[in-house]
Amino acid sequence: MVRTSWRLPVLAWTSVIALLSGSLLAAFTAAPASAAVDSLVLNGVYCTSGVNCWAVGNLRTGDATLNQVLHRTRGGTWHRVSVPEPGGTAAGDNNNLNAVRCASATDCWAVGDYQPLGSARLGQVLHWNGKKWSVKSVPAPGGTATGDFNELNDVACASAASCWAVGYYGIDMTTTTDESVVALTLALHWNGRKWSLTRTPNPGGHSKNHVNALNAVRCQSVRDCWAAGSDGAGSSFIHRNLMLHWNGAKWTTRTVPDPGGTAKPAINQIRGLSCTSRTNCWAAGSYGKELQAGHERLRNQLLHWNGRKWVRVTTPNPDGTGLQARNDLFAVTCKTAGDCWTVGWTGGHNGRPGLNETLHWNARKWSVIRAPEPGGTNGDVSNILTSIRCTKPSNCWAVGVVEMSAGAADEILHWNGTRWRTTLGPS
């Protein structure tokens, strides 16, 4: 299944998968084969120190979509690193990375998906050993036949011998006359030797057009992990927040607010997680209503875990809360309990430009912090931030994509403690 536009949430279940998965990538860069301009997208960023950072995503070259991995070292510039392409490099082949996480500077994981032309979409896991990236074998519970899909959206490590990768898997049997998709939550565990499948709940159901997806995972210890996403049923266009917890033995469903409601046509989606302790975690995403085909009223969603329950926290909405408002958060990161950032985008439809969104938490409230718009503010341009990582209060990196009519370009912003600045990536 190839998603042709990540901007089509809730129109059909083939595109609802893109909504629930939280990844922009493969969906966005599966551009028409006739596209002459390379498209580049960054989906994830992680730093092991102030001078060692990784960013991952994909790039479109010719008629193939390839993995994109950028590295920033002590020299202070971002450069592109050669990585495997398990999906192939021929016309129609697809490779995509959604997230990157490191246990140390010489032990990093990048996850996503790949799909040779005409084949199943399979989960992709790459490992960095300090010298090179290599492909690691992972289970494909969704199958390997045409129409089967397996996707990994995020990865987190509690230690070098305990990492989790999460996403969704299932089958797409949609035809020109009938939509038929089933998607189930996916959680893979690394024990220091191999990746294995772990049983997870699917509160959205297992039947036709029932979808469950995990977008984010974070661990405070090997016995304390959270995984979040969305679940719902296609016939009624209801999407609920989904929150799972790992206690060292099993994953269980935890109660979480649904600020968008649970009546048709509700939208609730969690795309990012961050924790500083067992009693302090944040979940970021959006909620709202599907008003009609192609038009959503979306508001920012930030939920806080206080050690006892998840509660909704008041959040700014730079695009307003009217009928055509769109506010959407994709990632959140906290260096301390009183210093957190969340990023995403606003606007981007009905002739309005898409603008970067950066919000900061100072232990009392979330505030809008202005960020550059490297793609400009014309109506046909969107600036979108997909991931963020801070090593200290004066050193944060946010990455994403600038979407233009001719294609897309990497977006990299740096926070120096005072303001956000645009940073150039590889040429």
Image (tube, rainbow, N blue to C red):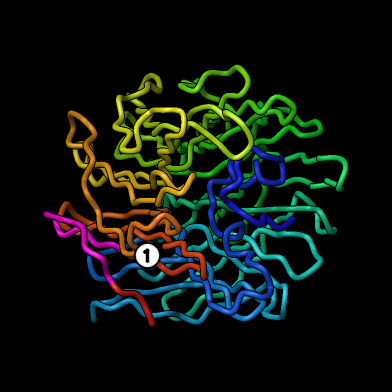
Residue 402 visible to the viewer: yes
Q: Is residue 405 above or below residue 236?
A: below
Q: Which residues are magenta?
A: 413-423
Q: Position of residue 300 (x, y in %)?
A: 39, 34
Q: Is residue 44 above or below residue 293?
A: below
Q: Position of residue 419 (x, y in %)?
A: 15, 56
Could you tell whether 347 is left or right of 396 in the image?
Answer: right
Quarter of the figure with residue 187 = top right
State the residue in front, 198 or 168.
168
Q: Is residue 216 above or below residue 382?
A: above
Give yes or no for residue 259 being in the magenta stretch: no
> Tag 1: residue type?
Glu
State the residue in front, 292 or 62.
292
Point 53% across, 46% down: residue: 22
- Quadrant assignment for the C terminus: bottom left
- Quadrant assignment for the N terminus: bottom right
Point 53% across, 54% down: residue: 24
Q: Residues within 10 Å of mark 1 (few under 14, many from 20)?
A: many
Residue 252 visible to the viewer: no
Quarter of the figure with residue 326 = top left
Could you tell me which secondary element the residue under label 1 belongs to? strand
Mark 1 — residue? 411
Q: Position of residue 253 (x, y in %)?
A: 57, 26
Point 69% across, 77% down: residue: 88
